[in-house]
Structures are given as structure tokens and as C-alpha cells.
Image (cartoon, coloured by chain):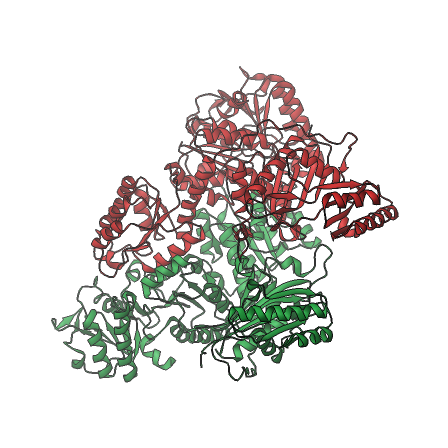
Chain colours: A green, B red
Amino acid sequence: MTDLLQTALDPRSVAIVGASDNIHKIGGRPIYYMQKYGFQGSIYPINPNRPEIQGRTAYATLADLPEVPELALVVVSGEQAVRTVEECAARGVKSAVIIASGFGETGEQGKELERHMLGVARGAGMRLYGPNTQGLANFGTGAIAGFSTMFLEVPPMDGPIGIVSQSGGMSAMSYGLLRGRGLGVRHVHATGNEADVTVGELALAVAHDPDVKLLLLYLENIARPELLARAAAVARERDVPIIAIKAGRTAGGQRAASSHTGSLANEDRTVDAFFRHHGIWRVRDPHEQARAAQAYLKGWRPEGRRLVVISNSGASCVMGADAADDVRLPLAELSPATQQAVAAKLPGFATTHNPIDITAALLSNSGLFSDVLPAVASDPAADMFFINIPVAGAGYDVEQFARDTAAFELAAGKPVAVAAWQESVAAAFHAQSVATFPNEGDALGVLAQVADHTALMRRPRAQAGDLAAVELPADAGDGFLNEAQSLELLARHGVPTIGMRLCKSAEEAREAFDAIGGPVVVKACSAEVPHKSEHGLVALDVASREQAGELFTQFWRKMDSMQVARDGVIVAAMHRGQHEFMIGARWDPVFGPVVVVGDGGKYVEALKDCAVLLPPFSAQEVQQALRGLRIAPLLEGVRGDPALDVAALSEMAVAVGNVIAGARGRIASLDLNPVMVGARGKGALVVDALVELGSGAE
Amino acid sequence: MTDLLQTALDPRSVAIVGASDNIHKIGGRPIYYMQKYGFQGSIYPINPNRPEIQGRTAYATLADLPEVPELALVVVSGEQAVRTVEECAARGVKSAVIIASGFGETGEQGKELERHMLGVARGAGMRLYGPNTQGLANFGTGAIAGFSTMFLEVPPMDGPIGIVSQSGGMSAMSYGLLRGRGLGVRHVHATGNEADVTVGELALAVAHDPDVKLLLLYLENIARPELLARAAAVARERDVPIIAIKAGRTAGGQRAASSHTGSLANEDRTVDAFFRHHGIWRVRDPHEQARAAQAYLKGWRPEGRRLVVISNSGASCVMGADAADDVRLPLAELSPATQQAVAAKLPGFATTHNPIDITAALLSNSGLFSDVLPAVASDPAADMFFINIPVAGAGYDVEQFARDTAAFELAAGKPVAVAAWQESVAAAFHAQSVATFPNEGDALGVLAQVADHTALMRRPRAQAGDLAAVELPADAGDGFLNEAQSLELLARHGVPTIGMRLCKSAEEAREAFDAIGGPVVVKACSAEVPHKSEHGLVALDVASREQAGELFTQFWRKMDSMQVARDGVIVAAMHRGQHEFMIGARWDPVFGPVVVVGDGGKYVEALKDCAVLLPPFSAQEVQQALRGLRIAPLLEGVRGDPALDVAALSEMAVAVGNVIAGARGRIASLDLNPVMVGARGKGALVVDALVELGSGAE
């Protein structure tokens, strides 16, 4: 696959169908760019009305070209674009970039045209980019099959960053923001409607570029997650961080995305889980993407999160400490030796513990920075440093501060971020290649991000292993299994479930009571009544065999009156854990198996205190996810309660993940609620379960 | 009081004790500033070693001056500063600004010196500013009794903004940020250690300045909330918004604040409640403070929150819709007429519903903005507008877009915010006085802020009314009341409480059972056992009179063995509501009465799902606060549950507010948990309560 994309990312020859002599037109700008930015391959303008375009021979049609171009940039629109794609396919072109809009994003007719073009391309082994795209640009080779005005606005410079975006506007904006920070960018690719090639597939190709050290993505939908997952795997292998925007996070955003690129909606919490699973860091917008780029390119991969805050303003020490807490960066406890060394350098009223307030004395003693910084550089308690300079400028030797800071970063070998809002001050630090931000929030946000993202990229990854095939009841079609079948299915796959009997008579119910021992729960069992309690078909704390028998009769009659299948009546042990959790799982049409773990009980839907995980995942990952729940304080035991058996709950979630993944789409959803979790060592037990079968992915 | 501060904010004469000829020194810069920025009063440099300073006659001592200066700026430090304060007091100076640090922020000895200076000043009717302050500056009069280098760095311009800050660094930074945005600033005052005058009192004085339209505060602690409350009242009356930073939000920040200005910690959720109560908008840092300034000065006071998003990029429409959702701004539903009018102006593939994507066609048709904007200006569904321009610059007629936008804002008479990250694009909009931000987050954050803040400033304010005096048991000292006393106290003040009897014998307990009707709750009652259930002294669902009698005997013996006062045994009606809430109240040493309402039950402390309110507040305000709880979805009823009687709960919270406020400190805390809330119309009932008495504010 990557070999094929080669003809798009690094073509030896490019034909521009609809070429223009006017460099301000869409058909003119790519030719101008390629000539200006050193493209070494052949450029073939195609325009039946002109013999020459921008100093190059123009051709009337594709058929007139002296060779088959590797890449065709299709600038003509509508019917003409479709015909050009057909001609390209016939001629043996390997990649076609279709700029025109008015296809899939406008409705079914446009989608049909896209499918037609795709069929033509597939038949000829040609790949399509777009339609409705701004095109592709590789500043490593000068192959610019795109028309963004931003390349005029901000001159390009080749560098270690790749941008792959569904939106042309966002690819241009990211490019501009990065170049504005002085960073070099190699790849700027937009995929538009993604009739064929998606962001994921392009990202996979770009991730293989050995010069790329950072990959920025913009997506409005994720149609083929498996390609994006492979891109992420290649990137992790090469220690290339991926920072992704997935727009359409909200209902309003998804509606807008649908009119923009015809995107289908992805469930947003599943998108979050997908990114986490693959070590991709998600941000909201190109500003967040750009603000962390320098930090990644500096190789910041901190192993800890303990922060030292240094400022020449006491107030900035206070706000720095507050802002650190906002992003959960703990303040490092400096050793007594470090504090003494700092104290020796500072005036009497300064603070030597962390945050370190070097005070306004900096104004009269420009050497304070170089005095104090080495004293803390070697403290092993410090993982990263934040220098906050709210006031400097005239009267301060800012050049010296910047030089001292750069030297300190080199000596410490740890991340050092500076906040300085005054342009002259920031410029001095930028000139020393110190990562400099306009405010605490940005600086500490980036430090926290690189720490968290490093941990995410490097965490041990659960292996899928051999999933046991999931056996379903022989006669199962689609729809719900009854509760007994659901519990049995789970039990067969290693999920601890409540002891129960499915009874067919009052006598069997009484015998079940004797066998299980009271008190018991009595529940009607019918695949046609998935929500029993709403019909009064559940009785808790049943204390006698007689009562069990009576309830059988009562429920049996009720099911009869409801005219539903009477699969039996369940008599089960009455079990109360320390806390009720829930585990859910479903087969997502895009992402496949998805597991949800969280607070259980009646209000699961209303309160939504749960974590989403994509299999395969480890029990350790479940435990970490549970620590992010609102009820997390209860896990360790509060108000005299014992700590909960989180390990057992986590193992259960892993087992449920194996079931949903192993069923490969034949199970549409699993709903285990409540899962009774006991005190540590006492296990977790499913007391009610509902399995819904689906037509499946395979 | 304001009259006195007049001599600090608008002095007719200023003496500088420790004056310097060097304008780069702290004793030189204020003289330089006052001469440069047009101070019309008398300037008296005091320095025994020089006959003349910066062209003005210098005096050896305060006593040598030809008149008593209204303001003395004390630049000398340590012992000398203390002596100068004494001399100022003796001479009849009205205001003294003490620059030196090394006082209260260093420990008890420094605090003692501050108290001494305050005593001297009080005795002479003199007010103190500082110590440990950067001083005061009024650019309306040129009275600059401060030394910030920022006034050199960024030239001042008088304007409608007042800055009052505990930190000199932050006052300078705010000044610089605002001036950098081209906004004029009149007041830049710092209070440092606040030995006497606090931010609140200065804010009160500045709020009276008729030219001030916006007030920015920085606080590290709130020592005298009543002055700040008065400042807020004056500001609301004049429609002057206050935007405040209260640093030391977190434990780490509070430790840092303590070393910075010697501040005592305020409980942060109470600070939030205090600000909300007084219509003050809280932000985290000076950047957030500055970013909204222009919007307020433009007079943006939107009455609704419905937003229209317009962009020339589809992706920016998507991200704009997402970002709007992040700050809870709903997208306005444009009328069919508006959509038709927009459609008539836009190319075929553009989107005419909100968000409106005018597409990259803007590049070829610069008139699209002026075509489309009037079509939406008059739609009554739109309260505010957001124009997102991620790509423009070369090839675009940005000047025209900016002019069209300014004209549109004028025509619409509603807030219009623009996001443009390209400096040249932003500059064009700035030149037209359009509020322009670098990204969606900032633009929409400001729109949401002005909408929310306007609602907060204009909301109907509950009146304190005549609080009934709270009667306490005659023999009550400090410490806990027993449960019966606690419930009776609440019942006397209109709080619905559970029906119960305090029994002194098993027979009384049996009689109580008969009178109340079973099942009942039986609970030991002792002021010395506030947490009964931890000692097994509570029995629920007691179903017979005999059992009630037995439990009496059992609890009576247990209390005996615990050697605690046996106040009796409570027999109470067994009452279960639809949901358990809690109401707490306490007398805060700084803020006075504080009420907390939230989710009840055992895990109140661990899960902290509650809202904080300061009396007086209305039931409507409680209802609004409850809608911010995590359990808010349950209030309206879910999964077949009825809606809850939120009105009754809210009335109860108001009544509890009256009790804690009316007790004027004699009640240290009230803990009502659980409060059983029934279905709508079924009321709310306190079933357990604990009152702790305190030594009181009065």
C-alpha cells in the first residue's frame, strides 16, 4: 500500500488537468509552487486552449502526454472531473487528486458519483484523493499537488512535521501556525471526502517517512480505524507522537461535519477510547496541536510529572502552583541540600522551597537566574521545570536570562518551559530555542501533555491472544437471549455469575430454594421481557420455599397474560456486594468491540459515570480507568467501608472484552448490571445480565 | 472612607521619602513618572544628601517641607520605614505607601511591626498602603506613587479600566496586557501585605470613579469581604463589571500565597460562592482578565445565549459548533426566511443553516461577507455572532471583510466576535474595533462569559429581611447539641423535620411506637455521640412496640457502658423519600454564614456533589444551583422515577440559611443528612440533624 501512495507523496511526474497560466488560480498555483519549491520531476500542464503555461509546454489532453504521469491533479469540476478520472484510469495514472467539491457532501447523488469514480479507479489500480480536497504537498521534494494560499502567505521550510487532514483549511492553518513558530513542515496533505484514501492511510504512509518526528492529524470522521491503528503502531515504534483533532465532538459539530465532508458520526467517547488505545493524543483545535510541537521535537519524553516552579514574582509562583494543580502536576519536594543551595544565592525574603520566588531582586541582580538554576538542576526530585516571567523588559538583562535558561536545560537534561507574555522577552527566549509560551496554562498544559502522552505511548500493551470462539445457543437468531442463557454464556467464558436455577414449575422453584439456601431472588425469565423489573417480575429477599413456589406461579401467570414466551422462572442466590458496578459491551459498526465499566445501579444512563475501553486491554488498564471515575474515592474504602475488589472487577471486564471481541459481531451488546463487587479479596459477581445478538461483522 | 482614600488616589501633594536622582531606582522612578505624566500637584523629594532631585528642591526630612503632604511614598526600608511611618503620622500625613518588603510575609516578627505601624497610623487618622507593595498609580491625574518598570515598557493612556491588585507584579502585568490591546487604563494600584487598606476597600473607592467602566482585581486572600461586597454593590449599581482573580485556589497555591503576602487561606468553594453572590466574575489569570476587557467596554450585555457561527471553512464551522457546546452556547435556529436569504447569496454547495459555511468561495468573491451578514443580522433567534476566519491573507480582501463586519455589528446591535490567528488578518479587524481573538476557544469563552456575567449581575437579589433570633437551649455552651435538640431547633425555625419523641424509659419508647405508628426508627440520643450509627446506636425499620422497648433498653445500657451523657432514646417515624439529599451550613470566620446543598447519604464527603451558597439567597437560586449538580438528571425523574420536590428542598435550604445567618456565629455548623426529598408535591423532611454551637462572631 505504501508503495502505491508513493506516487502521491513522492511522484516523479505530475499532470495538472485544468492548468492555468494565472498563478492566483487553483489550476495555476500548484505549477507555480512546484517550480518555486524545487520539484525535480516532470510537470505537465493540461489545457486545450494554450500552447504554454507558466513557461512549460501545455498539452491538450492526457493522451497527448509523452509519458504516463504518476500523479494527476484534477482541477476541473463536475462532470468533467468524473470524465478526467476515467481518462486517468484508462491511461494508467497511479494517483489522482480531485479538487472539486459538489460530490458526497451534497447528498446521495454526489455519493453515487464518488462510488463510480472509485470503481473506475479500483479497476485500474489507481488511488483517489478527494474529491472536495485542497490537495497534497510534500516540501521535502517540492511535489505540491495542492493550491492553498497559505504557502504564499507563509514561506515553506522542510522539516520533521507531517500534517494529514480531512480539511484543507485546517491543513493550511496548522501549516501556518507551525511555520509561524519557526518550525519546519514536510507533509501537508488533505483528504476531503475520502472517496478512497483516508487520513489513516495517508498517516500510515507519512509515518514511514524516516525524517518525520511528529504527526498532526485532523479528522471529521474515522471511517477505517484499522488503517489509523496501523499508522499509530508504526509511529509508536518510531517514537513519533501523533496529535489528533477529531472534530464533530458534539451533536452540533457532527451535524456541521455532515454538511462539510459528508461524514458519518462516530460516538465520541469511543473515539476517545480509540485514541487512548493507540497512544494518540487528542486535542480540540490546531492551536493546541501547534503549541506542543516544539516540546515534542525537542525530544521531551519525561518519565515523571514532578514540577519545579521558578518566578521573579510571588503572585506568579502562586498562580503557577494553582495552574500545576489544574493539570495534576505535583510540585516536587526539593531536598534540603537543594533548598540550602538556593537560599545561599537568594536575598533574605525570597522563598527557597518550591515554587521558588527569586523576587523582584532580579531587576537589580541579573545574575540571580544563573545563580539559582544550577542549584536545582540536579535535584532528582524534579522531573520538569517551569519558569514564569510575568514582568521583565526594560531594566532587565533578558538576553542573559534566556542564555542561562538554555544552559540550564542542557545541564538538567529535563524539560524546561518558560511563560513570558511580553513579546520582547519571549523573543529572547525563542532565540535560544527555549520552549516559551504566553501564559502558565499553555506552558503547564504542554508539560502535562508530554508527560501523559509519553506514558500513553510507552505503556505495556495488552495482546489480543487467542480468543475462545463464543458459542451461542444453537437456535439463536438476532435479538435478546433470556437471562438464564445470558448468564450461562458469560459463565462459560470465565465471567463469575450468580448461582441460579431456571425452574419450570412451582415445585422446581421450591427445590431450588432448598438447594441454594435462602434468601433468594425470584425472577421471570423470558427473552421477550428484557426489562423484568419494570413489569413487577422480580422479587428480592424471598425468605421461604413456599414463597418461592408462590412467586413462580404468580410470574408464570403474569407472563401468560403478557403473551410472551415463558422460558421459565429463575431462582438465584440473593447477593449483595459492597458496591454495585456495571459492565457493558457492544459491537461498534466502525470500531468493533467496545467495553464500558462504571458505577452501576438504576441510574447508569442518567449519571454516566463510566470508562470506555477497546479490547484487548489489561486488568491494569481497567484499574487505571476506574481511578478516573467520579466514584473513584469509594474504591479505596471510605467512612468505614472496606476497599473494593477492584482487581476482580477489572479481570471481569477483561473477560467481557474477550467475549465481545471473540463473538466478532454476533453479539451486538452485553449488559451486566449490577455487578456486585465485594471487599478486596471477596470477588465480583454478575447478578443480572442481558445479551443481545446481532447479525455480526462476519 | 472614600474621602480618606482620596488622598491616596488623587493627592494634591506627594512626598517621596528616600527620593533618588536616578530614574531607574525605586526612589527615582515615581518622581520621573509624575513629571512625565502630568501630575499637577506638589512633588516633594526627601533625601538628606542632595539639595535637588530631578530638577526639584529636595528636603532633608518631612519636617522641612513647606506643607503637610497628603501622600507620603515611603521608599526606605526596614527600621527606617517604620520610623518614617511614625514621622508621617506625627506630621499629619493622610496616606502612606510603604514599598519595603520584609514584614508580615516573613513571619510573626514582621506581622508585629505591621501591627505597630497600623496602630501609629490609626492613632493619627492616617491610612497605610502596603508594606511589600509596588504602590499606586492614577493615570487620570498623573499621581504615580509606584515604581513599576511596566510604565516605561508600555506607555500609559488614561482610560475606563481600574486595576486593584494585592500583587504589584500582577497589577503591572494586567496593565501591560490591556495596554498591549490598545485599551486605556486609569488606575493601577497594588496593596501588598494589606496591613491596613485592602483590595476590597480600594476597589470600593475606584468603583466610585465615574469614568471607570471595568474593574479588574487580583487577590491572594480576602480578609474583609464586607468591603469587597460593598465595592461589588456600587459596581453593579453603575453597571461596572468586576473580573477577579483569587489566586491560591489549590493547596499548593495557598502555601505559595502564604510566603508571598503572608495570606491566610480562604476555602476556595466559599470564595466561588462569594464572587457569584456579589456578581463578580472569577477568572484564573491576567490573560483571561484581559481577553474579555474590550467586550465589556463595548457594552456587550447580551440577554440570551443563542449563537450564530459563520466561517469560510467547513472545518471551522465544525470546530466552532463543538467549541460553542463546550461553553454551553446553543446554536440559534435561523428562520426559514433567513436561510432563504442566505441561500440566495451563497454558492450551491455552501451551508445555509447555522453554522453558516460561506466556503472558500470567499477567495474569489470578497463581497460574500457583506452579502451574507445583513441576511442574518435581523434574525430574532440570534443573540450573538461568531465569525471564524482560519484562512485569509494574500488574495483576500481582508480590509473589506473587516469593514463589513464592523458595519454588521452596528446594524445587528448584538455582540460579534471574530477569530483570526493570522496577525495581518487580526490587525485589519482590530483597526475596525471589532473584538478579535486568536482562536475559537477565546472568542466563544468571552461571548459565554459576558452572557453569564450579565445574567449574574442582573439577577434578582434575595433580601436578608428580618432574621428571627435563633433561640438556643438555655444551658448550651459550645459543642454539639443532641439530635433531639438539633431537630427541635430546626423545627422552631420552619424547617420540616421528622416526627419523633425523646424517650426516657422502655415504656415511653413503646408508647411512642403506638403514637407514631410503625415501622419506626430507634436512635440513641446523646450530645456526646454525634455519630451514632458508627456505634451501632441506630435501628431502622423497627416493626413492633416490644422491639422498640427492647432497643431502648439495649441503647440505654450501651450509652452507659460508653460513659456518655444519656439524653434519651429517640423513636421517630420511619421515612423514606425519593432521594436522599444533604444540607449543611457553617459560620465561616471570614465570610460568615455559608450553606451547602447536595447529594446526601453516606458518601457526602467522598463524592462532594454539592453547591455552596451564601445567605441571603432565594429558593430560585437554590434550584439553579441544584441544576449544576452531577445528580441533576435525577431531579426531573428518570427510569420511571417521579420528578423530585426540588421546590421544597430549596425552601428548606433558604430556611437553613436564615438559621445560620440569624445565629450570628453562635451556631458553628449545621449538618442535615439525610434530607428525604419526595416526589414533586410531597415535600422534603429532615430525618437526622446535628447542630454544633460555636463561640460566635458577636
Asked whether residue A571 appears in the rendered view, the answer is yes
* On screen, residue B40 above or below B182: above
Q: Name the foreground residue: B596 vs B285.
A: B596
Q: Name the foreground residue: B117 vs A196.
A: A196
Q: Name the foreground residue: B478 vs A10.
A: B478
Asked whether residue A361 appears in the rendered view, the answer is no
Could you tell me which residue is drawn at 73 percent across and 76 percent down? Answer: A515
* On screen, residue A497 above or below B232: below
Q: Name the foreground residue: A369 vs A624.
A: A624
**Residue B427, how many percent across, how many down?**
32, 47
Side (left or right) of B515 relative to A581 = right
**Residue A53, how many percent across, how many down?**
16, 70
* On screen, residue A312 above or below B49: below
Could you tell me which residue is drawn at 63 percent across and 18 percent down? Answer: B124
The residue sitting at the top extreme is B66
Count of all numbered marks drawn on residues in the image:
0
Quarter the C terminus of chain A occupies: bottom left
* On screen, residue A387 above or below A200: above
Could you tell me which residue is drawn at 69 percent across and 50 percent down? Answer: A340
**Residue B618, how many percent across, how many down?**
54, 36
Q: Which quarter of the picture shows residue A191?
A: bottom left
Quarter the N terminus of chain A occupies: bottom left
